[in-house]
């Protein structure tokens, strides 16, 4: 496929996904963490990692804008602002296709937001297939013996598995024909859960391309464990970054540490909210990525960050890990201070850091010590923080 062709990836993520999260989850499955990074962030990252994709658009639930902004943030102009979907998948896809009309891409790849492990060869195989076809479906051949049953209790026959294939996404189309098909079928039904089925209905021939058994759709809680196993089996390399931060005390009554407001007889001096714990963790993550430090991305002379919540900085660094299709393995921070006492606030700090970074609290360690009354820390003029971040990113 010629490089100049406009190719858009449409990621459908408007559902609730309640089966995957279970009754205890307040988040739709696409925003739940998978190895430290939300499912949808991983899905978006997979398409942004393919240089042939010109535009990426997510279709989200009408009430998901704030959740999306928290969990999916990439510094890439190809990622368009999300649009709201409809009550069914079919209507959500149509909403996304309509939103792309002003851009008018030549090709569109329609992908499930809950398939975060799609390999690049599957994406490229669909694009390549569209050089000779109007629609392309990635699929894997069925390897199990398939039985037919009308009542769910007795076998009524055995299917010929040599003619059976399991459909996956992204499903690729020439943009104008699939948009027209979706518009036409809207008046008949909103029950289609597969876009190539709409193409077939519209008389568009569908070609097959190579799928992947790793390209699973996360549907049930157990799928998260399976997805983590797949991630672990891929060629990942471990990286470690470190950071150190110092802030002096000035007049005030609260110290921000790890996103927790701790009452004290002073506050920390700084351009933002001076949260030395979140600052040092940000530096550690960026160091592990070899992407500079906090000042590189958030210059202290920029008025934009005056008084800003430092959660913004750590959240940014965590999203940079996700953008590299990586995961945060662990965060470890030490606070060196005579006062305030950190111990009573450690659990709250761990939970706050875990929430900001999008990882489980078991992956966050917060420790505290003093300087034995020596130096500026001993004189209670300020405090120091040290952090180590361990991440995994694809090798090479």
Image (cartoon, rainbow, N blue to C red):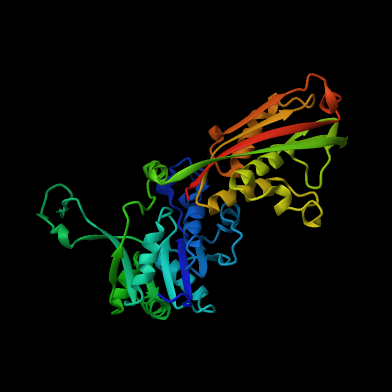
Taking depth in this image into account, of 37 and 241 the one nearest to the observer is 241
Tell me residue 261's x, y (percent): 74, 36
Tell me residue 107's x, y (percent): 43, 75
Q: Is residue 131 left or right of residue 393?
A: left
Residue drawn 57% across and 52% down?
Answer: 71
Find residue 328 and report its image quarter. Answer: top right
Q: Is residue 20 left or right of residue 313?
A: left
> Do we see residue 252 in this rendering?
no
Query: How many callouts does the rendering have?
Result: 0
In this view, 13 is above or below 260 = below
> Do we see residue 159 in this rendering?
yes
Taking depth in this image into account, of 172 and 154 the one nearest to the observer is 172
Tell me residue 187's x, y (percent): 38, 77
In this view, 197 is above or below 217 = below
Tell me residue 10's x, y (percent): 46, 67
In this view, 386 is above or below 166 = above
Pick out the residue farthest to the top.
Answer: 372
Residue drawn 15% across and 55% down?
Answer: 150
Image quadrant holding the N terminus, namely bottom left
In this view, 193 is above or below 392 = below
Pick out the residue farthest to the right.
Answer: 251
Find residue 257 and report its image quarter. Answer: top right
Q: Is residue 289 left or right of residue 152?
A: right
């Amino acid at each position: 496929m010629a490089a100049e062709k406009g190719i858009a990836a449409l990621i459908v993520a408007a559902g609730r996904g309640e089966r995957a999260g279970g009754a205890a989850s307040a988040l739709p499955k696409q925003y739940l963490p998978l190895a430290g990074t939300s499912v949808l962030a991983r899905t978006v990252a997979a398409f942004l990692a393919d240089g042939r994709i010109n535009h990426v658009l997510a279709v989200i639930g009408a009430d998901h804008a704030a959740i999306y902004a928290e969990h999916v943030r990439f510094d890439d102009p190809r990622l368009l602002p999300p649009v709201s979907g409809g009550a069914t998948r079919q209507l959500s896809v149509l909403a996304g296709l309509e939103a792309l009309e002003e851009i008018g891409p030549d090709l569109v790849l329609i992908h499930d937001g809950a398939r975060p492990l799609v390999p690049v060869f599957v994406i490229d195989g669909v694009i390549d297939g569209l050089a000779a076809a109007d629609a392309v479906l990635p699929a894997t051949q069925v390897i199990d013996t398939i039985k037919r049953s009308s009542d769910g209790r007795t076998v009524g026959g055995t299917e010929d598995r040599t003619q059976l294939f399991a459909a996956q996404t992204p499903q690729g189309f020439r943009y104008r024909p699939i948009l027209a098909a979706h518009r036409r079928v809207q008046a008949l039904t909103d029950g289609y859960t597969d876009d190539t089925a709409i193409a077939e209905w519209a008389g568009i021939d569908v070609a097959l391309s190579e799928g992947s058994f790793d390209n699973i759709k996360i549907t049930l809680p157990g799928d998260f464990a399976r997805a983590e196993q797949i991630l672990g089996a891929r060629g990942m390399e471990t990286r470690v970054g470190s950071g150190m931060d110092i802030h002096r005390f000035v007049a005030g009554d609260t110290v921000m540490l790890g996103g927790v407001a701790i009452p004290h007889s002073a506050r920390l001096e700084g351009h933002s909210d001076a949260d030395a714990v979140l600052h040092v963790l940000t530096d550690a993550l960026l160091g592990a990525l070899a992407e500079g430090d906090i000042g590189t991305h958030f210059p202290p002379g920029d008025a934009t960050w005056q008084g800003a919540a430092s959660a913004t900085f750590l959240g940014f660094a965590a999203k940079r890990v996700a953008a590299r299709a990586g995961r945060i393995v662990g965060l470890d921070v030490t606070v060196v201070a005579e006062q305030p006492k950190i111990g009573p606030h450690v659990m709250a700090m761990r939970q706050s850091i875990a929430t900001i970074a999008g990882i489980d609290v078991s992956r966050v360690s917060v420790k505290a010590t003093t300087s034995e009354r020596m130096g500026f820390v001993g004189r209670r003029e300020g405090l120091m923080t040290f952090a180590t971040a361990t991440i995994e990113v694809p090798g090479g």
